[in-house]
Structures are given as C-alpha cells and as structure tokens.
Image (cartoon, rainbow, N blue to C red):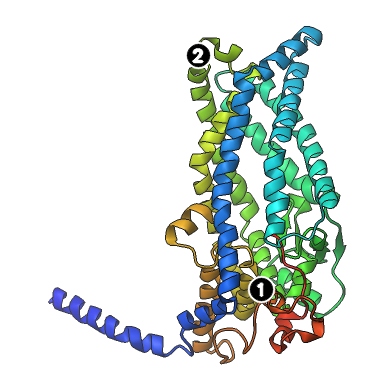
Amino acid sequence: MRFLGLAAFAAAFTLAGPAMAAALPFDPEVATQAWLATMGPEATARSNSYFEGGYIIDFASTALSIIVAGLMLVLGWARGVRSWIEKTLKWFPLVALGTSFFYILVSSVLTFPFSYYVGFVRQHEYNLSTQDFPAWFNEQLTGFALGLVIGSIFLTVLYLIIRAARNTWWIWGSVVTIAFAGVMSMLFPVYIAPLFNTSTPMEQGELRDSILALAQANGVPADNVYVYDRSRQTNSISANVSGFGPTTRISLADTLLERTSPEAVRAVMAHEIGHYVLRHNVSGMIFSSIFILFSFAFVHFTFRWAAKNERWGIRDISDPAGLPLVMVLLAVVGLITAPLQRNLVYFNEQQADMFGLNAAREPDGFAEASVLLSEYRKMEPSAFEEWFFYDHPSGWNRVHNSMVWKAHEIAAGRLPNTPGGPPPGWRPDFVVQSARPENAPSAATPPAAESPATTTAPSPAAPSN
C-alpha cells in the first residue's frame, strides 16, 4: 500500500508540474534568451573571445612567474644579493628586506612586457580601455611603488617569523598574513584607493534617497552614497564594497550612473548591500585564512626536499636567498587552490545576487546590468567553464535567475504583471555604438538606445576588477 501511495504521489507531482509552469505569466527560459539576443552575434563572439583568452592568460601568468623565479634561483641572483648585503650590512632584517626588495623589483621589470600586453595592448585591441599610455603607465608606477614598499616590508616580517619559529612558522606566518590582509583591507578605501580614483558624495535626488533607504532598511549604517570616477580608466559599469570594520564603504562607479537605468543602479547597489549584510568580508577572510594556511604548509613541507643539500646555495627555509623557490612553490599550489577560491567567491556572489533581487525587487534592472557586464564576460559558458574559471555567476545564470524570480513574484501577486524579456527594441549601449556609422552624430542613435537603460553612448568599457 505504501508503494502504491508513493506511486500515486509521484504521478500527481509529475502531472502538476506542467500546470504549475503554465501558471507563470511568461516562460523564464524564453525571457532569458530574449535578453541575451539583444547582444547580437558579433558582440557575443567578441565577448566570448575576450573572456576565453583570459583562460590562457591566467595559466601564462602563472607559468611566467615560475620561469622568472626559477631563473633568479638557478642563476643565483637572489643568493648573490643576500651574500652582498650580509657582508656589508650584516643585520638579518636588512638582509631580508634587501633581498625581498631586489626580488620584487627584478621580477616586476622582467614581467612588465607581459603586463603591458595584458593590461594595455589587449585592452585596446578589444576597445576595452579609455586610457592612453601615459595615464596607464603612471598608474602602473604607482601600484608598483606601493607593491615594492609594502611587499618588501611584509616579506621581511615573514622571514623574521620563519627564523624565530622554523618548524611552526607556517602557522604563525598565516596568522600574521591574515592580520596584515585585514589591516590593508581597512586602509584601502582611505589611503590607497584615492591614489587611483576620487570618490565624491552622490548628488541629491530620488535615486540617492532610494539607495540610502534600501541600505538603512537592511541594517547598513550608511548616511551617504559615494561615487568614484571609474571613467578615468574605463567606462565599464561597477560597484563595490571596500574596507573592513569602520572603513567599510559601498561605492558605485560614475559609469554605472551614466550607462544604466535607475532600476539597474538600484539592483546593483542592492547586490553590494547584500555583501555587507551577509558579512561576506568576514567569510571571505575566513576562506582566505584556510587557503593561506594550506599554502604555507605546502611550502614548509616541500621546501626542505626541494633545497636538499643546500641546492642553489640555499641554507634553509629561513635563508632569504630561497625566496624565489618559495614563490615557485606558492605558484604551484596556487594552481590547485585557485579554482576552489573562485568557487567560494562565486558562492558569495550568488548569495548577494539573490539578496539583491529580494531587496531591490528590480529583476529587469539586474538583467540589464548583467547584459552590460557581458561586454567582456562570456554569457553562456559550459558547466565546466563556469565551475573552473568564473568567480561570479555567468550572465546567463544571472539573467535567468532574475526572470525566474520575476515570473514567480508576478504569479504570487507581488509584482505587476509585465512581460518577460527586455523592453521592446532595447539593446546594450555597446552594441548600439558599434552599429553606428563611424562619423554619425549621437542624434543618429536608434530609438532603442534612447530607453532609460541607454541614455548615453560612451566608449566601450574595460573589465571590472
């Protein structure tokens, strides 16, 4: 009798499925494809090409790091610098500082051609940058100087820990690294971000008030909304949560205001508010702590084998001359941990997506923003691609979730009954711009570009950070 009851329940559930689906006001699958179709085949192919090229660049970057560190190790450059500083200054902290400074300086110089291609040449090949070379190079120099100073100091502290606790340094080093990351995260919006971008309070208006109300309704102690001049580097849309503890700040790019509708702005800001409310800065720090501990443990237990019998002139793991070997081992373990790290970030991003949909209740706005992000992100990856390479849900995933949410909210009577898919004639502004004749004035923009989602026709954007 129990079997017959289960069979009857299964049959009833199966028959009820089509009825439940039919009760929806529109088919989310069809609505999703309608949004994706607004890109057209040319923009889709370009986006796919750019993003898929990033797969190769990721591996090439790791391989280049290993090659450069390996050369410095085999050629004895780090050993020579360490020996020279020992003879002249003789104080271990200065030996560690000088060797670290030398390693960061030389490795940065040797990898600069690759950075130049990836960060400048390739971005312009895909029309994804608004910077000329002097502006780009100036920012690179600023970032390089910061990395050189901060990185050298951090590595010096790490070597002091290694020297003091050779068998347990990987535990204490992880603790210090995590604390260091927390401090840097706290200082970033106050001292580092202003070196690259200027943040100003958002202009008074209905949109600002609605964002503040959204934040305050969800427990975010915000009394202002900040806009940063992302257009200095790119026209890509973005928003972010930066800082830690008392310096936490939710900011949006000026390009987000210029390129998208108010509904999309609210949807994106609700997503960022979700990161704050769900304490993703804390969970992210916890996840990072685990990976740092694992990576340092890997270095600790493999270094002795790799440098056996003072190979390459390295005395032991506390010898700064072994820094290139440490970097090689970290690069190798990074190949293992990177997909896992991306998946943990992906999990947080998906949580923030759903929080944003429920908080802002702007499914069309979030779908709009997701399509605009597809300017440089592949919209429909394979399941393996999305698992291995993506740290954010794909555009298809985000648009589909928005349309499923919208359909069910309409069916439940909590949203007005509006059609699925984009507004009639709507297209992403980067598609409209590429379709416009080269010398055509802005007034020639097709009517579809005059919708609230495309009130401007900016130059193409570069990838978000």
Q: Nearer the viewer, mark 2 or mark 1?
A: 2
Q: Position of residue 398 (x, y in %)?
A: 55, 70
Residue at 81% x, 11% y is: 89
**On screen, residue 289 above or below 98:** below
Please indicate, yes or no, whether residue 414 appears anywhere in the rendered image: yes
Q: Quadrant of residue 49?
A: bottom right
Q: Residues within 10 Å of mark 1 (few under 14, many from 20)?
A: many
Residue ID for mark 1: 267
In the rendering, at what x and y percent does residue 282 appear? 63, 50
Q: Which mark, residue 141?
A: none
Q: Secondary structure at mark 1?
A: helix
Q: Is 279 placed left or right of 15 in the picture?
A: right
- CA gap, disc 2 and disc 1: 56 Å
Q: Is residue 293 visible?
A: no
Q: Is residue 38 above or below residue 335?
A: below
Q: SS for tag 2?
A: helix
- The residue beneath circle 2 is 308
Question: In this rendering, is residue 242 above or below 116?
Answer: below
Question: In front: 405, or 446?
Answer: 446
